[in-house]
Amino acid sequence: MAVCANRGKTTEKKVESALKIFNNMGSMSYLRFPDSRSARNFFSAQPSDFLVVSKGVPIFLEVKHLENPKRLPKGNLPQHATLNKFGHAGAQAILLVEHEGLGWRVVNVPDLATDVPSWDLSEVPLFDSAEAALKSTGLFA
């Protein structure tokens, strides 16, 4: 479990590096939420890994690392309902997935069905980097 958690942290650092690039362009700012697991549950669970405001749009950005080339188990996204609520309230709720050895996928969370045990992401395009995947949304410069 610790190895998977470390991969997730490495993936989050890659995403934060991409966000810093966008942040330097001036039309975007972000906040990395504290990780309740790292803080030994001192903090309550956060809705996502990052809160981003880009071009005036609030974006809740959740980041995942997967070894599976296409499937995301529903249990890996426990904040799905919370992110859906933010999405339906007018914010963007985005899931950015790094598939180990394959690339990156970006998914609009409200598009994920609520009544399935896992999501098949094979129809979602792959990108070479977190930066390219985020740019594909049109929300990032």
Image (cartoon, grey):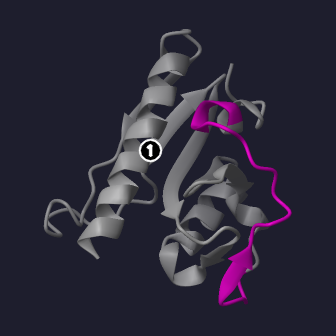
Find residue 60 and report its horizontal and vertical position in percent. 54, 48
Residue in view at x 54 percent, y 48 percent: 61
Residue density around tag 1, few if under 14, some if 14–19, many if 20 or more, within 10 Å? many
Find residue 10 and report its horizontal and vertical position in percent. 36, 47
- Residue 42's place in the image compared with 62, above or below, is below
Find residue 121 and report its horizontal and vertical position in percent. 75, 67
Residue lying at the far top in this picture: please name it: 25
Q: Give whichever of 136, 84 is nearer the camera.
A: 136
Q: Give whichever of 34, 98 is nearer the camera.
A: 98
Q: In the displayed structure, does residue 93 sit left or right of residue 100?
A: right
Q: In the displayed structure, does residue 21 sit left or right of residue 4?
A: right
- Asked where in the image residue 131 lies, by quadrant, the reply is top right
- Residue 39's place in the image compared with 79, above or below, is above
- Residue 139's place in the image compared with 93, above or below, is above
The stretch drawn in magenta includes residue 117 = yes
Residue in view at x 71 percent, y 77 percent: 119
Q: In the displayed structure, does residue 57 sit left or right of residue 31?
A: right
The stretch drawn in magenta includes residue 23 = no
Query: Which residues, given as a range, are shown in magenta?
Result: 114-132
Mark 1 residue type: Phe
Q: In the displayed structure, does residue 97 sit left or right of residue 112?
A: left
Give the residue at mark 1: 50
Residue lying at the far front in this picture: please name it: 101
> In the picture, which quadrant includes the N terminus?
bottom left
Residue in view at x 73 percent, y 64 percent: 110
